[in-house]
Every structure is written in structure tokens, then in C-alpha cells.
Image: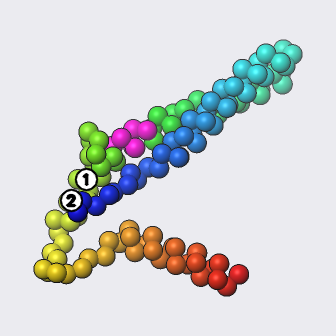
Amino acid sequence: MKPDYKNWVPKNMLYLFAVIALVCYAITCFLHRVLQPGMKKSVLSSLFLIVAVVFTAIFIWMTRMYRAFSYDGNRKLSEEIVEGLAGYIEVPENGLVLDAVTSNYVYHNIRKKKRKCTA
């Protein structure tokens, strides 16, 4: 049974950065067309354009990280890390190993459930 390792960069985060950038570009175009020439138009259009460019850069950077950490992609950095760490661990036959990430995930889910029970 091959484990299903998820990517360390969530796709939803990539979508969020792309949507924010597109919305900022749209607001920039809208402000540029609607507002009368002047200081207010220049400042607001420039501000939204800068924010859009920043979010575009973050989106591109995070997309590269998503591809780098893909377990099945070309770079396979995630596979190198997981398999490299697994090479240092000796598991006795019929032994069990708890992944640190799994235990952290389980710990946080247990805390969430406890909060729901006490609330």
C-alpha cells in the first residue's frame, strides 16, 4: 500500500492568490475608467495595481513551490524529503511507526473536538 502524501502547498491557497490578484486588476481598471483625473484616481489606481502585482508574484512563487513539492511531479522534492527521512528510521518487523505530521494533525483534531464538547 503506497501512502498518499498531499502537497505541502494547498491548491486552495493558489486559487485564493490568483482570485485576489484578478480582483485587484479589475478594480484598477474600474477605478481608471470611472474616476475623474486627479490625485484620488492616481493614488487608488496605483495602490490597487501594486497590490495586484504583489499577489501575482506571490501566486507565481507559490505555484513554483506547489510544483516543487509535488510528490508525483517532475521535481519530486517532497518524495526526496519523505524517502530521505524514512531511510534513517529502522522499523522492526511487524512494528508500528507514527508519522510526526500525522500526530500533529491528530492532536489538533482532538483539541478541536474537545473544544466542541466543552462549548
Is residue 108 shown left or right of residue 118? left
Find numbered disc 1 in the image and state the secondary structure of the residue it sits on: helix
Q: Is residue 108 magenta?
A: no
Q: Is residue 67 magenta?
A: yes
Q: Which colour scheme is used?
A: rainbow
Residue 87 spot, x, y in % from top left: 16, 65
Query: Mark 2, residues whose alpha carbon is within 10 Å: few (<14), some, or many (≥20)?
Result: few
Number of residue marks:
2
Q: What's under tag 1, amino acid-wise?
A: Glu
- Residue 115: mark: none
Q: Which residue is drawn at 26% across and 39% down?
A: 74
Q: In this view, does 31 lie above or below 96?
A: above
Is residue 102 shown left or right of residue 97? right
Q: Residue at x 36, y 41 (%)?
A: 67
Q: Mark 1 points at which residue?
A: 79
- How many angstroms separate mark 1 from mark 2 (CA)? 6 Å
What's the magenta region? 63-68
Residue 45 spot, x, y in % from top left: 74, 24
Q: Mark 2 points at which residue?
A: 83
